[in-house]
Image (spheres, rainbow, N blue to C red):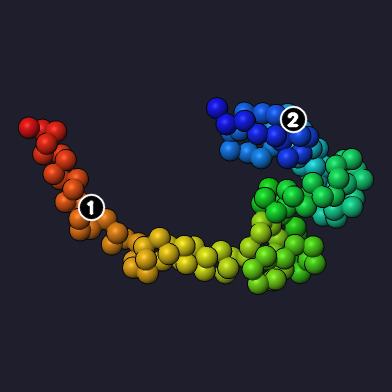
Amino acid sequence: MNVRNCTRCGKIYAYDGFNICLNCRKDDEEDFKKIKEFLDENPGANISEVSDGTGVDSKKIMEFLRQGRLEIKDEHNILLTCERCGKSIKTGRFCEKCTLEMQREFKQSIGGGRDPDSLGSGKLKERMRIVDRRKRG
């Protein structure tokens, strides 16, 4: 079992792919529900209004924006920018153009510069056929 300390509260927990413990994740979900309810009642509210109305820290609201769980209505905001090119974005960490470019770069790096669809051909398929024959016989 992989045991770690929660990056938020410092308690020890069984690592399950998240950097924070289950209690901190539950707290986050409660805060997110508060924010969602507030925004349903007050559409178009800014971050400071949401923070004041819900009691949720503005840093946590920004974290929800970066995670893509919330979206800014204004197209030309100054709060959220693409981490790669600096363009103003509504949600997440990267703009659509940079996201597409990075996906293409990752696919090319996995394939060693070749088309990712051609990776399944050649020796790998041959090995699989030989193993299949051995199992049958």
Q: Quadrant of the N terminus?
A: top right
Is residue 123 shown to the viewer in this render? yes
In the drawing, what numbered circle is on residue 13? none
Q: Is residue 46 above or below residue 34?
A: below
Question: Tag 1: Cα neighbours inside 10 Å, few (<14), some, or many (≥20)?
Answer: few
Determine whether the residue tagged by mark 1 lies in a helix, strand or loop: helix
Question: For the point 63% across and 38% down, which residue is it?
Answer: 18
Is residue 43 shown to the viewer in this render? no
Three-letter amino acid code at the position of disc 1: Leu
Three-letter amino acid code at the position of disc 2: Lys
Relative to 49, is 83 on the left or the right? left
Q: Quadrant of the C terminus?
A: top left
Q: Position of residue 73 (x, y in %)?
A: 75, 59
Which dot, 1 or 2, sits closer to the camera? 2
Question: For the point 64% across and 68% down, which residue is it?
Answer: 84
Determine whether the residue tagged by mark 2 lies in a helix, strand or loop: loop
Quarter of the view holding residue 74: bottom right
Q: Residue furthest left?
A: 137
Dot 2 corresponds to which residue?
11
Question: Tag 2: Cα neighbours inside 10 Å, few (<14), some, or many (≥20)?
Answer: few
Dot 1 corresponds to which residue?
124
Question: For the point 79% across and 46% down, which residue is it?
Answer: 60
Q: Position of residue 56 (x, y in %)?
A: 85, 42
Question: For the point 58% across and 38% down, which residue is it?
Answer: 17
* Separation (CA) of disc 1 from disc 2: 45 Å
Q: Earlier in the sequence, mark 1 or mark 2?
A: 2
Q: Nearer the viewer, residue 39 or 59?
A: 59
Q: Position of residue 42 (x, y in %)?
A: 85, 47
Relative to 52, is 68 on the left or the right? left
